[in-house]
Amino acid sequence: MVLTHTTNHTYAHPFPTVTLAFFLRYYSPHLNPFSSHVLSTDTISSHVDPATGRLHTTRIHLKKSRIPTAVVKLLPASVTGGGGDKSSYVLETSVIDIKEGWMKTESRNLNFTGVLSVVEQQQYSATPADQPASPTPPRGTASVGAHLRPLSPNTFVTTTLSYHSMLGGRRHDKPDIVASHAAAATATPDNGSPRRIGDWISGWGARRIQRSIESIASTKTDDQMVKSRDGMRIVLERLRNNGVVAVLRELRRREGKAGVFDQSSP
């Protein structure tokens, strides 16, 4: 079973600015105070397809607490890794077509996938989802005024979050590693006496456990989406009010790094 949650949102900013904010949203807590849970960000690859002109980027983020607290409390330490702060690597891929005015992104956790896999897919567009994009002129033709698309003041985003738990299940008839570890572990029920997690899974039912974990995770969706949008909104407002160069120069100054954006204008 896969539990999905889809939302739509509109940013009152043009598409090029929103795409820039997307890549800057985890740059620094100074720029986005809602990004303090992101410990690091690294770009694995980035290239422009010469045939389509589309920018393909793959990044990896290290974030805190990818497993909801309620799930951590529900399962034994042998499955979740014990108490304390948790962190997980998140793989992010994106494709941008700046001419057609759209961007597709996907983010997925790389750790604890046996317990809970979370996939976030987003579609950014300069036009609403129910309105077809303006056609672009064929390659090789001159760009005349009739073919120029006016810059929309808004960017429309559709976000789909998918939750999938494999705990206690089997796939392709291979031994379930999580279940084998869980069967050897002990859990503490409400009466305080030890109890084997394997018996707990068998008694309660793997599907029921999976649905519970997926449901617990999905209940955090609204809060997570609000924080994510608030963070993007802060970045967008700073880009609008201060300008791209000024924002990047200030970030570099705070990091104590010198670069092209720190040089005085002629």
Image (spheres, helix red, strand yellow):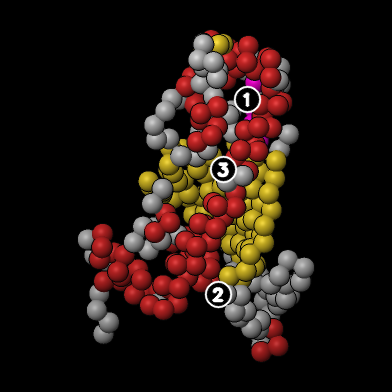
Is the stretch drawn in magenta largely helix, strand or loop?
A: loop
Residue 232, placed above or below residue 65: below
Region of the chain picked out in magenta, as a range: 164-168
Given residues 53 and 201, the one toward you in this image is 201
Between marks 2 and 1, how big is the CA–CA gap? 42 Å
Instruction: Give the side of residue 116 with respect to residue 147, left or right.
Output: left
Q: In the drawing, what numbered circle is on residue 54?
A: none
Considering the numbered disc 2 on the image, is that residue within a helix, a strand or a loop?
A: loop
At x 63%, y 51%, the residue is 121
Q: CA distance from mark 2 to mark 3?
A: 27 Å
**Mark 2 lies on residue:** 13
Circle 3 residue = 108
Image quarter (top left, top right, bottom left or bottom right) of the N terminus: top right
Closest to the observer, 34 or 246: 34
Give the amino acid at mark 1.
Leu
- Give the class, few, some or many, for how many residues have Cα within 10 Å of label 3's Cα (few <14, many ≥20): some
| Residue labelled with disc 1 | 167
Q: Which amino acid does the dot numbered 2 rest on?
A: His
Distance from Cα at disc 3 to Cα at disc 1: 17 Å
Residue kind at label 3, given as amino acid type: Arg
Percent across and percent down for residue 196 are 56, 11
